[in-house]
Amino acid sequence: MQTLKIDFITSLDGYGAAAGWPGLWGVWGKEYLDWLATSPEKDDPLLMGATTYRLMSSFTAEGERGTEALDGIPKYVFSSTLDEPLAWANSTLVSTDAVEHVRRLKEESDRPLRTLGSVALCRSLLLAGLVDRYRVCIFPVITGATGQERIYDGYPDVRLELVEARTFDKAVQLLEYVPTVLEEPPGA
């Protein structure tokens, strides 16, 4: 059985995007881009929802720096609003139940799986107990006025065990955890 990693990029205040800001909030550096390009998981299949698909495929179509590497990666897009054919290369539209489809993918895939953004999809996969790792890259910006997609709203309580921490370009913090969804707060 393959593993599933939730993979978010966020502003310091927990937003997944912000109006008017470029991809990666315009705060990328050589170390971070090199890590993206050479990471052993760089070719692992990506899972995403329609909103993330629309955003990331537009970044790729516009030649946004750092996104071209995503073209060759298999992508599973969970949506009831998108139609075939999807324009972004190597994208498969999945309109059936995401939790069941991902459960099957974990059993059948020859590579580990990871998400790309997709707040609601990640929340449902976490609640279903399908997530093995939870990774966040925190970018050094606060987007309180323009932030969109607060990532953790609607999430259950989750205990996180840190298994990796790293800093790129003296700016971007990578934190990777093993998540445990809690039935109730530890002090209850």
Image: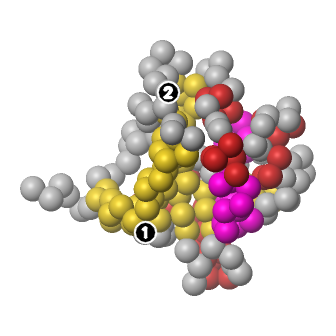
**Up-down: is 6 above or below 44?**
above
* For residue 176, side relative to residue 43 (left or right): left
Whether residue 168 is situated above or below residue 72 in the rendered picture: above
Front-most of 76 and 169?
169
Judging by the rendered image, the residue that carries numbered circle 2 is 141
Quarter of the image where one finds residue 38? bottom right
Regarding residue 54, the answer to whether it shows in the image is no
Q: Residue at position x 85%, y 32% from top?
A: 62
Residue occupying the point 59% across, 46% down: 117
Which image quarter is the C terminus in? bottom left
Instruction: Please give the residue where the numbered disc 1 appears in the rendered image.
Output: 129
| 103 and 60: which is toward the camera | 60
Q: Residue furthest left?
A: 187
SS state under label 1: loop
In the shown orientation, is residue 57 left or right of residue 112?
A: right
SS category of the residue bearing label 2: loop
Reading the chain from its start, which is encountered first: label 1 or label 2?
A: 1
Number of numbered labels in the structure image: 2
Q: Is residue 171 left or right of residue 153?
A: right
Residue at the image point whose x is 64% and y is 36% from the top: 28
Q: Residue at x 63, y 73 (%)?
A: 112
Which is more foreground, mark 1 or mark 2?
2
Q: Position of residue 116 (x, y in %)?
A: 63, 51
**Left or right of residue 6: residue 108:** right
The disc label shown at residue 176, or none: none
The kind of residue tagged 2 is Val
| Residue 8 magenta | no
- Asked if residue 44 lies in the magenta stretch, the reply is yes
The residue range painted magenta reads 35-57
